[in-house]
Image (tube, helix red, strand yellow):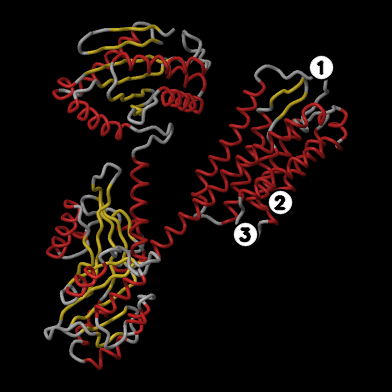
Amino acid sequence: MIGSVHVLEGGSNAVNGIWTQFGGNLSFVCLAISLWAHFSIQFQRRSATQEKIAFGIVAGAASIGSILLAVEFNPGLYIDLRFSPLALAGMFGGPIAAAFAVLMAMAFRFCVGGVAMIDGIVAISAATGIGLVANVWIRKRSPALMDVALLSLALGGVLVVSMATLPTLVHARVLAIIGLPMTVLNCLATVLCGFILLKTQQWALERSILVTAFSQSPDYLYVKDRNSRFITVNENMIRLYRFKTTAEMTGLSDFNLLSRPLAEGLYYLEQQVMDTGVPLIDSVEHIEGRSLLASKVPLRDRQGRVIGLAGVTRDVTERTVLERELRESKNLLSHAMAGMSDGIAMYDSKGFLVFCNDQYRTAFPLSGDARVVGAHISDILRRVAETAERAGIPDNDCEDWIKVATAALHSNKDEEVQLYNGDWRSIRTRLAEDGTAMAVVSDITATKQAEIALRLSAEQLKSLAETDGLTGMVNRRAFDEAFARETAGSARKNTPFSLLMVDIDRFKAYNDTYGHPAGDQCLRTVSRCLRQSVSRPADIVARYGGEEFVVLLPSTSAKGAMIVAEQFARLLSQENIVHTGSEFGRVTASIGISCATGATLRVNPNRLLTEADAALYDAKTQGRNRILAHSLEERHAMKDVG
């Protein structure tokens, strides 16, 4: 590595396993940057300076770790990726992050010492300087992948110049011997880690936009669970009920906020929405002297089950008062309508437009010129059809659509229509005693977008609740649901169903010997081998608890399950994870298999788990590192994989 050359002696042949060692170095650097990407969201609540300091410390630690994991390319000559984190710290974190990163790396390099210490410190400074130049280049805009690519090329150039000019490195002929791999590998690490940081910035921006839109919406926004308890609310809801923070409302229900009769009515409506799955659109509510227009949409998980609802409520107190007064005086109506944000139109009993404000015309940009006093509703709808202003108009039966829509004018109704450009309009039509129809048109585009955003947020929350944080596998909760669903399906189809229960041998001894971080990495490796052992989308791999894993294999016989188990054992053996606390000298696993078909699955599907657990127990008591199958027809079958 640059700055760690002792004296170059020997030939130019790389030691065996150099690329495997380098892969570990590259993985460490990428892991460090990935961990920062994962936890950086916590620093967004703090000052920008604190966030940059933290990033600089992480980058400096990644550089030091890379030095510690340096790969010996030739005797006395090492390769590491210390320069990539330093350049990225300068580019993405600016001077503050760069200062912390470079000082840590330089201090560590100084402590290491050696004949090339000065050259190493110079090269570290140059790499960081390249990052700062890149930071100035992108200061007035967001960085892109092309900027990261240019940074990697610039870093490569700095490394080549350093190896060609710094005295100790020139004397050691570093450029001629390892110049190409050193440069290419640092450039590769820069691109990979830079891509991670770019995606992190993109996700942070999207999350910030979603949170801002939710919290600053002029309407009252909230999400409730299946029991109508608040999960989250926006700032308007907090002010409405006179709370100080969102946390104070979390877990409460309308019974904690309103009178019991009113709370019971709202609870009944919300439970009806969740039981039927039918949204409640623009329902009028009267709370504490306010008139509110509420839309409530059921939220579903991936299996289609309703898990809660999202609500959007608008305060229409002033509008309600105006509408009541406007029915009494047409002149007062005309005066008030001019200052409203919504579009208002009145049609007489024969369908002719007798009044509309400018907002009504501008709400429909392509047919606005046809919405003039004296125009008939059928002519207006014909212009809508001709310009394809609204979505869902049939192409081959336009006149029939116009007739139906014209006949529906004189009826009390609420509808939402989507325009050609994706915007949404809410049209609320009410009839007067003399047959006059009044239409109120509102732009509900933001509300619709908020509903979609809330639905996506709920789906993301559900995904997080079903995933094991360490291995990324399905967790125990999701496994239980999948087990019940898949065994019921196999019972109906009368197809075989197999289950693998896997336990890592001597895992406690592994943790005690190598520490919990190594144990976590071991669990990740085992989970990866399990995922690689199955090939069908229907197969489900889950973390059952601790060091135990389960694999669901629908429509799979005991023979097929044995093939999957052998494939996993082979993959784990190839990993060759050293385990001095095991009688086998490496990490192994014991596997229990159970298989059943229709009748058993219908009567007692849990017997599959019991048999697999018993098979696993027998496998461990009979010496571990083996596969043992229990089936309901043939009691035992065993295969030693040692």
Q: Nearer the viewer, residue 471 or 552?
A: 552
Tell me where residue 470 sits by quadrant: top left
The residue wearing badge 2 is 132
400 sits left or right of 443 in the view: left
Q: Place residue 57 in its image quadrant.
A: top right
Q: CA distance from mark 2 to mark 1?
A: 38 Å
Residue found at x 67% / y 16%: 16
Q: Which mark is residue 10?
A: 1
Task: State yes or no: discs 3 and 2 in contact (Cβ < 8 Å).
Answer: no
Q: How busy is the neighbourhood of tag 2: few (under 14 within 10 Å), some, or many (20 plus)? A: many
**Is residue 503 toward the left or the right of residue 379 in the image?**
right
Q: Amino acid at mark 1?
A: Gly
Spatial CA distance of label 3 from label 2 is: 15 Å
Circle 3 residue: 141
Going by the numbered disc 3, the residue's amino acid type is Arg
Q: CA distance from mark 3 to mark 1?
A: 49 Å
Bin the neighbour count of mark 3 within 10 Å (Cα to Cα): few under 14, some 14-19, many 20 and up.
Answer: few
| Quarter occupied by the N terminus | top right
Q: Residue 283 placed where, x, y %?
A: 20, 67
Q: Secondary structure beneath disc 3?
A: loop
| Front-lying residue, 435 or 539 | 435
The amino acid on which the numbered mark 2 sits, given as a three-letter code, is Leu
Q: Residue at x 58, y 44 (%)?
A: 195
Marks 3 and 1, the one that precedes in the sequence: 1
The picture places residue 402, in percent across and down from the top left corner, at: 23, 72
Residue 611 coordinates in the image, percent (x, y): 24, 16
Query: First in sequence: mark 2 or mark 1?
Result: 1
Residue 261 or 87: which is nearer the viewer? 87
Relative image position of residue 17 (x, y in whole percent) = 65, 19
Mark 3 vs 2, N-terminal side: 2
